[in-house]
Image (tube, rainbow, N blue to C red):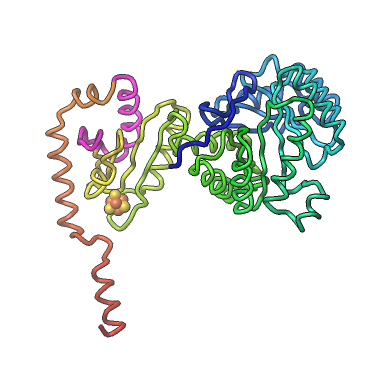
C-alpha cells in the first residue's frame, strides 16, 4: 500500500481531517432536518455504527432552525449540506454547524461564495468544496466538451480561488462522479494540484450490493494509492449501512483500528461437512453487536480448515458432526455441531477479556489435537484426497479431447 499523501489538516468540530489524522467515515441523514428528534435518533445510530462526521441537509429555514437544536445534542460533528441557496449556508453557520458543504455547480455568484467563505473564516468553520459530476457548472461542461476529470478539478480550483480572495483556507474537497474510473481519475488529478484534504466518494452509487461494489472499487483504489482523508459511501440504503461499510473498508485496509469481529469463512467445497453459508451467517449475526476486535474463521472441514485459517485468532472447522475449535492454529476443543456458533462466541469473549495464552491454558490441547486428527483421518479415508472429484473430471476431459 502506498504511504498516505500528506495533506494539510483541518478540524471539523473535534474530528481532525487530513495530515496524520486517521481517515474518517462520513454519512448523511435521510430525515427532514426540521425533525429534530428523528434526525438525532439517526445520528446516534450512525455514530454507534462507526460514523465520525455526519451531514444534514439545510435546504429551508426550518432545517436551519432544526440544526440549531441538533448541533448541541449531537455526539459527532455536523456538516450542513448546501445547494443553490447561499443564505442557507449563512443560516447553518448561525446554527453553529461544524462544517459546510457547498456545491460549486449550483452556487455560482462570486459575491455569494465569498460572503459564505468570509463568515466561515470568521467563525473558524471549514467548508467542503463538493463538486458533483451530476451538477457540474454548465459553462465548464461546455468548455470541456462534457463531464471530464479536468472539468471537475477546474470547478474545485475556481471555488478555491474565490476562497483565497477572502483569505479562507479551511477547505476539504471532493470531486464525486457515479462513474468509477472517472471519479478515480478526477481525484488523482486533484491530488496532484492541491494539498488540501480530500473527501472521497462515488456519488449515487445506488442500492446494495451494486452500490457497495462501486463505492468500494473507487474509494478503495484511491486509498490504496495513499489518496483520501475522509470517505462517504453514497448508498440507496439505510445510512447506517454507509457508516458500517466505510468503517469496514478502512479496517480491512488497516487504516483504522479494528472495532468488531473480522469474520472470515471458507467458500465451501465438496469436502464441507456443514452448511458453511448458514453457520457463517449465524456467526455474523451473533457477533454483529459485539465489540470484539478478533479475526474469527468458520471453515467447512477439519481436513484443510485449521491449516488454511491458521492466522485467525479463533476458528472452528467441522468434521464428523463435531466442531473443532482452534486458537491461532492450535486445536483447543471439540463441541457438538449444533453448538458451533455458541462456542465461538464463548471463546471469542474469553480471548477478548483474558488473551490467547489464558484461553489455551484452560484446556487440554493435546486431547483436542488427537480428536481433530481422528476426524481428519476418518474424513480422508471416507472422501480420499480428492473430495471435489477433480481427478475424475480431468480423466473425463482428457478422454473427450482424446489426449
Ligand atoms: S477444503 Fe474444507 S476448508 Fe477448504 S473450502 Fe473445502 S470445506 Fe472449506
Closer to us: 51 or 102: 102
* Residue 356 is at least partly visible in this image: yes
Q: Which residues are magenta?
A: 325-354
Vertical side of 145 occupied by 375: above or below: above
Vertical side of 104 occupied by 214: above or below: below
Picture residue at 72% right of the left edge, 40% below the top: 157
- Quarter of the view holding residue 88: top right
Q: Is residue 188 left or right of residue 81?
A: left
Pick out the residue farthest to the bottom: 402
Pick out the residue farthest to the top: 72
- Quarter of the view holding residue 230: top right
Predominant SS along the magenta part: helix
Q: Is residue 6 left or right of residue 349?
A: right
- The quadrant of the rendering that contains the N terminus is top left
Closer to us: 140 or 130: 140
Vertical side of 289 occupied by 380: above or below: below
In the rendered image, residue 233, in percent from the top left (x then y), is placed at: 60, 40
> Per the image, is 326 magenta?
yes
> Per the image, is 135 magenta?
no
- Quarter of the view holding residue 387: bottom left
In the rendered image, residue 375, in percent from the top left (x then y), is placed at: 17, 46
Picture residue at 86% right of the left edge, 25% below the top: 61
Amino acid at each position: 500500500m502506498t504511504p498516505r499523501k500528506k495533506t494539510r489538516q483541518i478540524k471539523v468540530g473535534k474530528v481532525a481531517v487530513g495530515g496524520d489524522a486517521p481517515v474518517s467515515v462520513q454519512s448523511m441523514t435521510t430525515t427532514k432536518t426540521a425533525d429534530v428528534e428523528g434526525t438525532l435518533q439517526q445520528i446516534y445510530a450512525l455514530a454507534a455504527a462507526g460514523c465520525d462526521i455526519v451531514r444534514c441537509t439545510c435546504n429551508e429555514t426550518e432545517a436551519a432552525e432544526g440544526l440549531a437544536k441538533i448541533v448541541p445534542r449531537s455526539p459527532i460533528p455536523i456538516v450542513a449540506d448546501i445547494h443553490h441557496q447561499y443564505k442557507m449556508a449563512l443560516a447553518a453557520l448561525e446554527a453553529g454547524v461544524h462544517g459546510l458543504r457547498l456545491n460549486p455547480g449550483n452556487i455560482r455568484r462570486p459575491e455569494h461564495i465569498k460572503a459564505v467563505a468570509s463568515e466561515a473564516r470568521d467563525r473558524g468553520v471549514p467548508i467542503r468544496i463538493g463538486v458533483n459530476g451530476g451538477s457540474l457548472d454548465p459553462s465548464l461542461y461546455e468548455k470541456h466538451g462534457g463531464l471530464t476529470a479536468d472539468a471537475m478539478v477546474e470547478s474545485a480550483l475556481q471555488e478555491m480561488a474565490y476562497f483565497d480572495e477572502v483569505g479562507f483556507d479551511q477547505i476539504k474537497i471532493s470531486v464525486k462522479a457515479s462513474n468509477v474510473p472517472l471519479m478515480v481519475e478526477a481525484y488523482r488529478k486533484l491530488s496532484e494540484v492541491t494539498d488540501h484534504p480530500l473527501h472521497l466518494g462515488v456519488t449515487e452509487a445506488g442500492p446494495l450490493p451494486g452500490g457497495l461494489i462501486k463505492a468500494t472499487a473507487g474509494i478503495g483504489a484511491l486509498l490504496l494509492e495513499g489518496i483520501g482523508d475522509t470517505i462517504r459511501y453514497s448508498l440507496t440504503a439505510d445510512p447506517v449501512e454507509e457508516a458500517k461499510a466505510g468503517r469496514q473498508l478502512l479496517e480491512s485496509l488497516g487504516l483504522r483500528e479494528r472495532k468488531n469481529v473480522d469474520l472470515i469463512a471458507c467458500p465451501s467445497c465438496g469436502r464441507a461437512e456443514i452448511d458453511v453459508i448458514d453457520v457463517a451467517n449465524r456467526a455474523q449475526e451473533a457477533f454483529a453487536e459485539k465489540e470484539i476486535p478478533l479475526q474469527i474463521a468458520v471453515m467447512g472441514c477439519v481436513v484443510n480448515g485449521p491449516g488454511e485459517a491458521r492466522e485467525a485468532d479463533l476458528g472452528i472447522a467441522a468434521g464428523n458432526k463435531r466442531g473443532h475449535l482452534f486458537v491461532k492454529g492450535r486445536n483447543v476443543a471439540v463441541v457438538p455441531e449444533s453448538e458451533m456458533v455458541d462456542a465461538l462466541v464463548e471463546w471469542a469473549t474469553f480471548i477478548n477479556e483474558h488473551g490467547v495464552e489464558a484461553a489455551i491454558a484452560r484446556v487440554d490441547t493435546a486431547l483436542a489435537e488427537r480428536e481433530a486428527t481422528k476426524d481428519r483421518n476418518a474424513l480422508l479415508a471416507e472422501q480420499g484426497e480428492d473430495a471435489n472429484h477433480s481427478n475424475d473430471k480431468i480423466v473425463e476431459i482428457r478422454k473427450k479431447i482424446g489426449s
